[in-house]
Amino acid sequence: MTDTPPDRLSNDPRSPHYDADVLGRGIGIRFKGNERTDVEEYSVSENWVRVALGKKVDRHGRPLTIKLTGPVEPYYLTPAQGEESDAG
């Protein structure tokens, strides 16, 4: 049984791709083979991530972002509730 994160996810509550339950479990992102912790939004099928551009914000106080393209591999940081990890 595979437990895969959604194809597209955003951590902005105003986005239609926001899912609090999924974000509550924790999502890790591997982008171009490297771990990224600054991802604001991602799309696996379209091969891009959106990351914050330093500490810069727009006039509404939201972080400015930049879209980077490349292979995206999301994964859950914690197993689903009621499931055991397969480490063994």
Image (tube, rainbow, N blue to C red):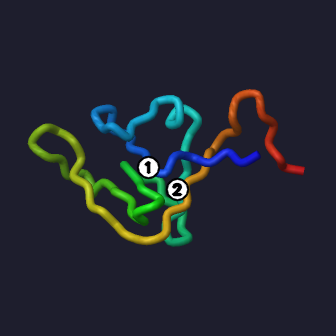
State the residue position of label 1.
Answer: 8
Q: Which numbered circle lies on residue 74?
A: none
Q: Nearer the viewer, residue 36 or 8?
A: 8
Q: Residue at x 27, y 61 (%)?
A: 66
Where does residue 81 sit, x and y in percent of width and height?
A: 70, 29
Left or right: residue 40 versus residue 81 is left
Where does residue 58 sit, x and y in percent of width and height?
A: 14, 46
Left or right: residue 39 versus residue 88 is left
Q: Residue at x 50, y 71 (%)?
A: 32
| Figure quadrant of residue 14 | top left
User: Can you name the residue that lies furthest to the right here?
Assistant: 88
- Residue 83 versus residue 33 in the image, above or below: above
Where does residue 80 sit, x and y in percent of width and height?
A: 69, 34
Where does residue 26 sit, x and y in percent of width and height?
A: 56, 40
Left or right: residue 55 versus residue 87 is left
Q: Amino acid at mark 1?
A: Arg
Q: Nearer the viewer, residue 30 or 56?
A: 30
State the residue position of label 2.
Answer: 29
| Figure quadrant of residue 17 | top left
Q: Residue at x 9, y 42 (%)?
A: 59
The numbered mark, 2 or 1, whose residue comes first in the sequence reads: 1
Instruction: Say whether marks 2 and 1 touch (CB < 8 Å).
Output: no
Structural crowding at the residue carrying mark 2, measured as other residues with C-alpha within 10 Å and reported as few (<14), some (14–19) or many (≥20): many
Circle 2 SS class:
strand
Mark nearer the viewer, 2 or 1: 1
Structural crowding at the residue carrying mark 1, measured as other residues with C-alpha within 10 Å and reported as few (<14), some (14–19) or many (≥20): some
Q: Amino acid at mark 2?
A: Ile
Q: Nearer the viewer, residue 57 or 3?
A: 3
Q: Residue at x 60, y 51 (%)?
A: 75
Circle 1 SS class:
strand
